[in-house]
Image (cartoon, helix red, strand yellow):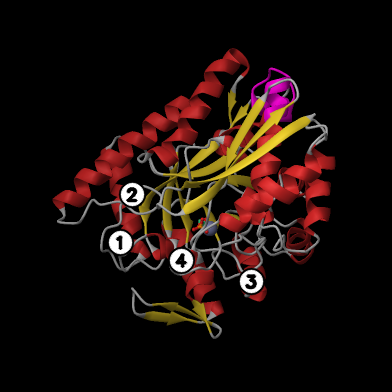
Amino acid sequence: TIETVTARRIIDSRGNPTVEVDVVLADGSLGRAAVPSGASTGAREAVELRDGDSTRWHGKGVDQAVAHANGEIAASVRGRDAADQAGLDAALIALDGTATKSRLGANAILGVSLAAAKAAAAAHRLPLYRYLGGADAHLLPLPMMNIVNGGAHADNPLDFQEFMIAPVGADTFAEAVRMGSEVFHTLRRDLLAAGHSTGVGDEGGFAPALRTAEEALDFVMAAIERTGYRPGTDIGLIMDPASSEFFCDGVYDYAGEGVRRTPSENVDYLVKLIDSYPVLSIEDPMAENDWAGWRELTARVGDRCQLTGDDLFCTSETLLREGIRTGAGNSILIKVNQIGTLTEAMAAVATAHQAGWTAVMSHRSGETEDTTIADLAVASGCGQIKTGSLSRSDRTAKYNQLIRIEEELGSSARFAGRSALRGA
Ligand code: PGA
Ligand code: ZN
């Protein structure tokens, strides 16, 4: 049973405050979880409670969320069975009482939800992935490694937010990390040789002053080849345009490129990119308010490209069901803090799988050293994880945790590889 809940303010990878929670059980077992934070957030995400006092932390303080966790939440969950995750999460949702977790804050609620799961795992003397996933949890996820940053994650003109590589040809997770790291360093050398900056963005990928997606893709393709890998066969390309960020008044406004595209023109443009490069998956190719555009793109290429809804679904089962019903996308991104409890995030994965869709476990652009999502990727059996570049400890911590899990699973470990992707 839960004995104490202690929340505190720590800082995330961007140096902004965030919530960390310790849950201690009666037997002394400790679970600790830190809450991530997005920059290009979906409009329908659960509410991250920020103090809004501009004289402190530029308005981003989380003192209220911390106080809620230490006060009201701690008092109400004391004595609860930490092993009853569904019951705990339902109680947290009911205590908050709003549809968006805006009263207590999704950051306060998620911290407690995840810390309780980790405390329960510790009490069972099991690693989190096994405690949550059971004895069958042995699938190591295909990593989507973000090696070029743009959009809201960098100060360059690139309209698309993320250009990723996925080592689909690797035999093991550890090999996938090696392949990704090699390409990352080749890309660094190539960018430097071409006179570009090799400074990195929020997720640890390079942020060169490129203007078009094609320029970025050409650099990545060249780096894959020059490292000795076959694009598409050994390493596939993945993009997250995060297009809600540049969809204004019904038009996709590519400011860096200097082009405006209607939804249909944007579909044509994306289809052209899919036809010209080995693009295996695109996240938020169309904006969160452009469901018609989503359906048009899915009808055109959904059979040969994974189309993952991030802002579109916000890890909400309700929105996901709408996408499944109407044919908008074929995959969902899972960000635990978009929905605010572990139970709801795992339910979204299950609903996607039941519909024949895929799910991708994901970090946020603001992260911490917390590696919970690495375990959740294995526990859920989703087979895919998006957790940034091959640099910066807030990103590599998740890769390193998956390397440890693969080692621990030994001969029962299986690397998802290409099979995890929808339509690839
Ligand atoms: P965010 O973006 O964490 O800054 O919201 C990540 C993404 O769009 O996938
Ligand atoms: Zn996204």
Circle nearer the N terminus (1, 3): 1
Residue type at mark 1: give it. Glu
Q: Quadrant of residue 343?
A: top right
For marks 4 and 2, give the CA distance: 16 Å
Q: Which residue is pictured at 64% across the width and 48% down the height? A: 336
Asked if residue 83 lies left or right of residue 342, the reply is right
Count residues near mark 1 (Cα–Cα under 10 Å), then give few for <14, some for 14-19, many for 20+: few
Circle nearer the N terminus (2, 3): 2
Return the residue found at the far bottom.
249
Circle nearer the N terminus (2, 1): 1
Tell whether label 2 touches label 4 (CB within 8 Å).
no
Whether residue 206 can be seen here: yes
Magenta stretch, main secondary structure, is helix
For marks 2 and 1, give the CA distance: 10 Å
Identify residue for label 3: 296
Identify residue for label 2: 221
Q: Secondary structure at mark 1?
A: helix
Q: Secondary structure at mark 2?
A: helix
Asked if residue 250 lies left or right of residue 356, the reply is left
Q: Which residues are magenta?
A: 119-135
Q: Secondary structure at mark 3?
A: helix
Circle nearer the N terminus (4, 1): 1
333 vs 237, nearest the viewer: 333
Q: Position of residue 127 (x, y in %)?
A: 64, 22
Residue type at mark 2: give it. Met
